[in-house]
Image (spheres, rainbow, N blue to C red):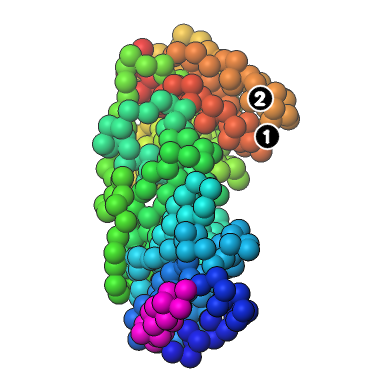
Amino acid sequence: MKKVIMYHARRHIPLVGFLLLLSAVSLVAACAIAIIKPATSHGRAPQVSLFGYQVRYPVANGTGVDSLVRSYADDRVDQFLSLIGDARYDPRNKLTIGYTLNHKGKRTMTATFDEWQQIIKQPTTILSTTMTYDLVAQKQLSIADVLAPDADQKGTIGGLLYDYFKQHGVALSPQQYVNLLQFKTQSVQKFWVNSDTITFAFNPRQLDAKDDLDLVTIKKQLLGDVLRPEYATSDPGQDVSVKSDFIINDQPTVGQQIDPNGKLVALTFDDGPGPYTLRVLDILKRYRAHATFFVIGRQVTGHADVVNRTLADGNEIGNHSWDHASLPALSRSRLDQEVESTQQVIQSAANGYVPTQMRPPYGSVNNSIRSYLAERNLKTALWNADTLDWNTPDSSIVHDRIIGAAADARIILLHDIHPWSVDAVERAIPELVAAGYQLVTLSQLEQYR
Ligand code: ZN
């Protein structure tokens, strides 16, 4: 009751204006409503009704969140009163604010305020505002407060959207699918935190558009570390879920489906594993792309983890000799050492994986090398587009050469040991995917072309 009285006091309505402009009956009625429904700290809805406005808002738990909620309501009333100005006692001016308590747990509370405002000679405005509060930290939360700072880089949300849309055969253009993968926190216009899910309102097809919003509900468990730890766990409590367009409750399962009628490109990375290989793997994974890595045998030692990750992501590993020797000049025993010891080191690093492609260093090859490799079930793997990235330390030129080389059945030569090559690939891969290219391994390309 105290809270409501204070609330009235804040309005500070002059008594003369009161009596002149308002009938005694409506005065009594207005006060009665306000007094009958006092604010309590037990979750009963306070309701304030005075003259032309009626405001209802939820009560959290008697903490600082309550004053945040009430100051929101106060601000809306203040704005309404300033809009109607001198006509504040004209009962045709009306403001009604109601709410839905979407969630109230121990950690967070989400409420949707529905506001209906009618001012004479002006169009009626309807406003729906959703707010989430942290009941422990006693503050209002933005989406950036809920998501981890590196959520966009991690790409988890975009990946879930992409896989879910693919799994359900949602017809989107390649560019729209890339847009999904490039999900950005800032594109979220509204969000709801429930006990076990988070719902985002944004346009998943065109992430920069402000209109035509869709609601996507994702289980907290699937979001994992892209949520800040305090919001990542279940927060059981009252739940009134919003009606969502897409509900992602389980990890979407999508196998890599290659459309043989589409355009295929094989990116190949030579001379690794190196310090930038993991970055290349992250970029490929993010865009659901695959590539072939021609590794140098002696560098595989000590990098078994990189080799295994490369394969686990669905990429291919090829043989690029033990120490980058030009093969045609070698004696038979040196040749064995270059080729077979590399096969063996890959096999033992990668749980028995046996490469089927050999890229001769410098592309130096002759018929006797070809038949030597063929006897060992190794294909001679050359390329048909060279970026010359090794002697062009400029990511923008290398990027342009990748894009310029792109055409169906192209095998593009790159090196994952140069940072500028990785920068170039980071820009080029989403562009290639958006242009409809399927980035496949060399063996996949050979299977279809
Ligand atoms: Zn090489």
Q: Of 101 and 294, which appears nearest the observer?
A: 101
Figure check: 390 above or below 205: above
Residue in the picture at 62% in, 79% down: 16
Is residue 136 something one can see in this rendering? Answer: no
Quadrant of the drawing holding the C terminus:
top left
Q: Is residue 375 left or right of residue 317?
A: left
Figure check: 412 above or below 318: above
Q: Which residue is mark 2?
A: 398
Specify the amino acid type for callout 2. Answer: Val
Quadrant of the drawing holding the N terminus:
bottom left
**Residue 283, position as x, y percentages in the image:** 51, 39
Whether residues under marks 1 and 2 lie with C-beta atoms below 8 angstroms apart, the answer is: yes
Badge count: 2
Residue at mark 1 to residue at mark 2: CA–CA distance: 8 Å
Q: Which residue is mark 1?
A: 420
Residue in the picture at 63% in, 63% down: 86
The range drawn in magenta is: 23-40
Confirm or reject: label 1 Cβ below 8 Å from ligand 1.
no
**Residue 305, position as x, y percentages in the image:** 45, 50
